[in-house]
C-alpha cells in the first residue's frame, strides 16, 4: 500500500503561483508513475499532469501546458506540481495519484493509478 498526502494548497490571487507537494509513504515511490488531477465543484475529476516513475517523461493537459510544471524527488519520496499564472478556472481540489503496472492506460486516465491522496484545495481569487 501507498499513502499519499498532498499539501501546499490555499488561496491565491489570479496571476499568482502555488507549489503543491505530494508526500508518499508505504512503498518505494521511485517505481511509481505519478499524476495530478483536479476536481472543481460540480464537475468531474480532470487530468492535470503526469510523470513517469523515472521522471524521464512528463505529460500535461493542454490547458496547463506552459503554466504548470510537474516534478518529483524520488530521494524524498515526494512529487510536486508548480502552478504559475493561476486563473480563476484553476480553482479546484487537487489530487495526487500514483501507480505501477498499468502502463496500458494513458497517463491522463485515472485507471492508470492505484493510489490517491485526499486532495488539497486551491482557490484562485480575482
Image (cartoon, rainbow, N blue to C red):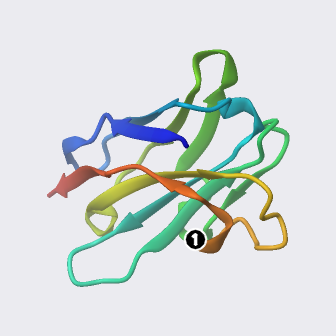
Query: For residue 49, which quarter of the picture?
Result: bottom right
For the N terminus, the image quarter is: top right
For the C terminus, the image quarter is: bottom left
Q: Position of residue 100 (x, y in %)?
A: 74, 52
Confirm whether residue 106 shows in the render.
yes
Q: Residue at x 47, y 62 (%)?
A: 37
| Residue picked out by circle 1 | 110
The residue closer to the viewer here, 104 or 7, is 104
Secondary structure type for disc 1:
helix
Vertical order, 116 against 26 (above or below):
below
Q: Is residue 80 left or right of residue 104?
A: left
Q: Position of residue 65 (x, y in %)?
A: 62, 59
Q: Is residue 22 left or right of residue 28?
A: left
Q: Position of residue 96 (x, y in %)?
A: 47, 50
Vertical order, 60 against 24 (above or below):
below
Q: Position of residue 69 (x, y in %)?
A: 59, 43
Amino acid at each position: 500500500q501507498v499513502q499519499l498526502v498532498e499539501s501546499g494548497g490555499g488561496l491565491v490571487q489570479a496571476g499568482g503561483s502555488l507549489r503543491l507537494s505530494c508526500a508518499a509513504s508505504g512503498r518505494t515511490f521511485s517505481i511509481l508513475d505519478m499524476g495530478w488531477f483536479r476536481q472543481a465543484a460540480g464537475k468531474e475529476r480532470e487530468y492535470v499532469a503526469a510523470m513517469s516513475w523515472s521522471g524521464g517523461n512528463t505529460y500535461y493537459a493542454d490547458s496547463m501546458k506552459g503554466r504548470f510544471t510537474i516534478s518529483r524527488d524520488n530521494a524524498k519520496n515526494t512529487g510536486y506540481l508548480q502552478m504559475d499564472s493561476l486563473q480563476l478556472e484553476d480553482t479546484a481540489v487537487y489530487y495526487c495519484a500514483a501507480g505501477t503496472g498499468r502502463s496500458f492506460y494513458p497517463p491522463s486516465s485515472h485507471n492508470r493509478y492505484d493510489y490517491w491522496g485526499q486532495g488539497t484545495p486551491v482557490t484562485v481569487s480575482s
